[in-house]
Image (cartoon, rainbow, N blue to C red):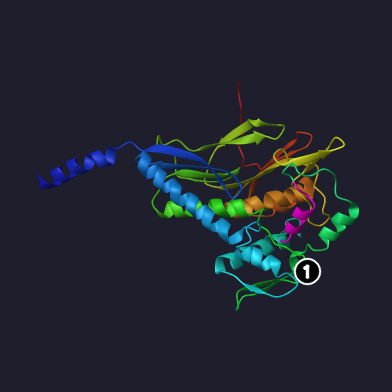
Amino acid sequence: MKFLLILLALLPMLTAAQEKYSRALVLMGCHFEITVVANSRAEGDRFIDLAAGEVTRIEKLISEWDSTTQVSAVNRQAGIGPVKVDKEVYDLVVRSIRISDLTEGAFDVSWAGMNQIWKFDGSMKRLPTEAEVAAAVSAVGYKNIELNEKEQTIFLRKKGMKIGFGGIGKGYGADKAAALLKSMGVPGGIVNASGDIVAWGKQPDGKPWVIGITNPFNKDKVFSWFEFDGHAIGTSGNYENYVEFNGIRYTHIIDPRTGWPVHGVASVTLFGPNCELSTALTKAIFVMGTDIGLDLIKQLKGIEYIVVDEKGKIYRSDHINLKPVTK
């Protein structure tokens, strides 16, 4: 009888209907949407607050725009001397350099100096000159980043050189926020950092999470969708940030080797083991182009892809089962 009473007491808790709770936020200078499965609105809000706090913590470590961060200190000391940083920052730079090596500089963590000549906030009134671009490129080059593992320092050998995590930071933030929520026992959720996505578990009704792929030729619509299968997603498109001069669109994705915005690819979506890697590799494919970029991706285990070129041709992995949107 006592055992039965205990079961009866637990029954309301066991059968309590969970719901999904979402909130849109601006973090790391972009749009985040955090969704969690929780027992109540209060619990959902608490989880979302903690995830947002984790992303904010990371931003205060790695933002090159905030003069108080360790990354800003490293950039100020370029050509002068090494700067000691937290292990988390040091390790992120190490991983970024590995991706730079893997992509032969198509992704380059030292690209941030390009922000001085290319601005996609509406303030650009003219194209930079060839001389201005060449000067910016001369300060780019991940092989000029000197690391000291024992002292945990970073030194940029060239004056004017800058590191920046614009091509990888959102993915890293999404990974860390999701990891925190999972460690707290949140059974399911999505951290969406402007298309860089980590999802886990299932919706409260037991159905899988559904992810839409933005139509790069009409960003307010999706051209396909799929059921999330546990991968982390990185997304880049030429439809978000760009400038136009003389009828030509210049995307925010810049080839760090030439200093000029890239052409040929409209959108890249990658599915990988973590959002950090998937996000970084999307930028590399834009720079490398479909032929070379996809040849690289096909050699990497655990990476699937959907790539749309500027003519609308779709390239996808054999394991990707796209479901077209029907009216």
Task: Using residue 40 as the reference point, say whether residue 252 is left or right of it.
Answer: right
Relative to the observer, which residue lies in front, 304 or 169?
A: 169
Q: Quadrant of residue 93?
A: bottom right
Where residue 294 appears, as percent x and y from the top left, is 73, 48
Task: Using residue 182 as the reference point, say whether residue 170 is left or right of it.
Answer: right
Residue 119, compared with residue 315, is above or below; it is: below
Quadrant occupied by the N terminus: top left
Where residue 168 appears, as percent x and y from the top left, is 64, 54
Residue 11, compared with residue 220, is above or below; it is: below
Quadrant occupied by the C terminus: top right
Residues in magenta?
110-119
Where residue 243 appears, as percent x and y from the top left, is 78, 40
Residue furthest to the left in view is 1
Q: Give the residue at x 89% y 51%.
A: 129
Q: Give the residue at x 73% y 61%.
A: 110
Name the kind of residue labelled 1 in the image.
Answer: Lys
Relative to the observer, which residue lies in front, 46 or 68?
A: 68
Task: Using residue 161 as the reference point, say whether residue 177 is left or right of it.
Answer: left
Residue furthest to the bottom in view is 150
Q: Is residue 203 visible?
A: no
| Residue assigned mark 1 | 159
Q: Quadrant of residue 89?
A: bottom right
Secondary structure of the residue carrying tag 1 is loop
Q: Is residue 260 magenta?
A: no
Q: Give the residue at x 81% y 57%.
A: 257
Q: Residues within 10 Å of mark 1 (few under 14, many from 20)?
A: few
Residue furthest to the top in view is 327
Where residue 201 appears, as percent x and y from the top left, is 45, 44
Residue 87, compared with residue 135, is above or below; it is: below
